[in-house]
Amino acid sequence: MTGGRLQGKVVLLTGIGGGMGRVTARLFAREGATVIGCDLDSDSAAETVRLVEADGGSIESSAPVDLSDRNDIDKWISETISRHGRIDVLYNNASLPRFAPFAETSTEDYLFTIQNELHLVWHACQAAWPHLAEVGGAIVNIGSGAGFQGVRSLPQSAHAAAKGAVLGLTRQLAAEGVASGIRVNCVSPGVMATPPVLAMFKEFGDNAPVAPIIERTIDGKPGDPHAVAYAGLYLASDEAKWVTGSHLVVDGGASAIM
């Protein structure tokens, strides 16, 4: 592979094992990045590596990496620096929420969701920060429509709290990053055609809790994960060198159309 919008960049990408993470890994590698991925699931991460290499791309995988453990994050990043000497982009894709109605959400499930949707972003950003400062790098966080809009049909209070915090953290890190030349932006997907969403439709059909959201999209379907990956690609690339603190919503218009 030659050329590409991320040519020569070393990209840390969390959650490469499937869904949007796998799609993003393949796209970024096709655009010339060296993708340094991690995941909890060794087998699914290995499959992503196989696919990227079959495409002709460059990828390395560390798995299992528990992003709820700061020691695992520090080790992953330090090993990347040892091998490559730099980090140009941190792409915080990984996410592991638990869903339940607010009144029935246990403290355990709430704390699990915050740990695996907010804390992992905080710790990865903090661990990568000095290395990104050396090159004027970029952070792309994956938020969610849940972070800025409530949904009556979907019990997601813990998820909403975590992703709302990710959006607020993105803006504050963008402000603090100005001094070091670090750009920090957020992409918020709507309901995408990822394995959990497809499984929900298989189980519930037209009564799936996300159905009222999808009805408001431009085509009435769950979104293609590539749409999120391309949004992230723009923000990670030098094309967005004058973009920081931004929030790019990729939801088919669902949050804009009543």
Image: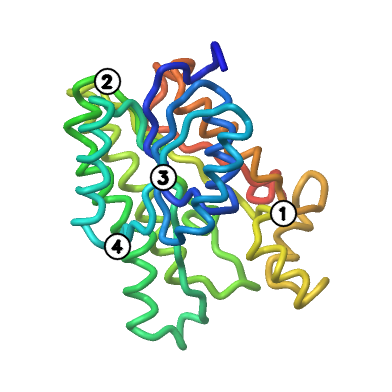
**Vertical side of 154 occupied by 198: above or below:** above
Q: CA distance from mark 1 to mark 4?
A: 37 Å
Distance between mark 3 and mark 4 Cα atoms: 18 Å
> Three-letter amino acid code at disc 1?
Met
* Circles 2 and 4 in contact, beta carbons < 8 Å: no
The image shows residue 137 at horizontal and vertical percentages of 31, 25
Residue at mark 3 to residue at mark 2: CA–CA distance: 24 Å
Left or right: residue 124 compared with residue 8: left
Q: Amino acid at mark 2?
A: Gly
Nearer the camera: disc 1 or disc 4: 4
Q: Earlier in the sequence, mark 2 or mark 1?
A: 2
Choose the circle earlier in sequence order: 3 or 2: 3
Labels 3, 2: front one: 3
Q: Which residue in the protein does label 2 denote?
A: 136
Q: Nearer the viewer, mark 3 or mark 4?
A: 3
Q: Residue at x 46, y 88 (%)?
A: 104
Q: State the mark number for residue 68.
A: 4
Q: Crowding near pointer 3: few (<14 within 10 Å), some, many (20+)?
A: many
State the image coordinates of residue 146 (x, y, percent, origin top left): 52, 59
Crowd class of label 4 (few under 14; some 14 to 19; many from 20; radius 10 Å): some
* Front disc: 2 or 1: 2
Looking at marks 2 and 4 on the same chain, the residue that comes earlier in the sequence is marked by 4
Task: Tell me the crowding category of disc 1: few under 14, some 14 to 19, or many 20 or more residues within 10 angstroms, Cα based.
Answer: few
Residue 223, image x and y in percent?
Answer: 71, 48
Which residue is under mark 3? Answer: 61
In the figure, 134 relative to 121: above or below? Answer: above
For label 1, the residue is: 258
* Residue 99 in the image, given as x and y percentages of width and height: 51, 75
Q: Is residue 20 left or right of residue 129?
A: right
* Mark 2 nearby-residue class (10 Å; few <14, some 14–19, many ≥20): many
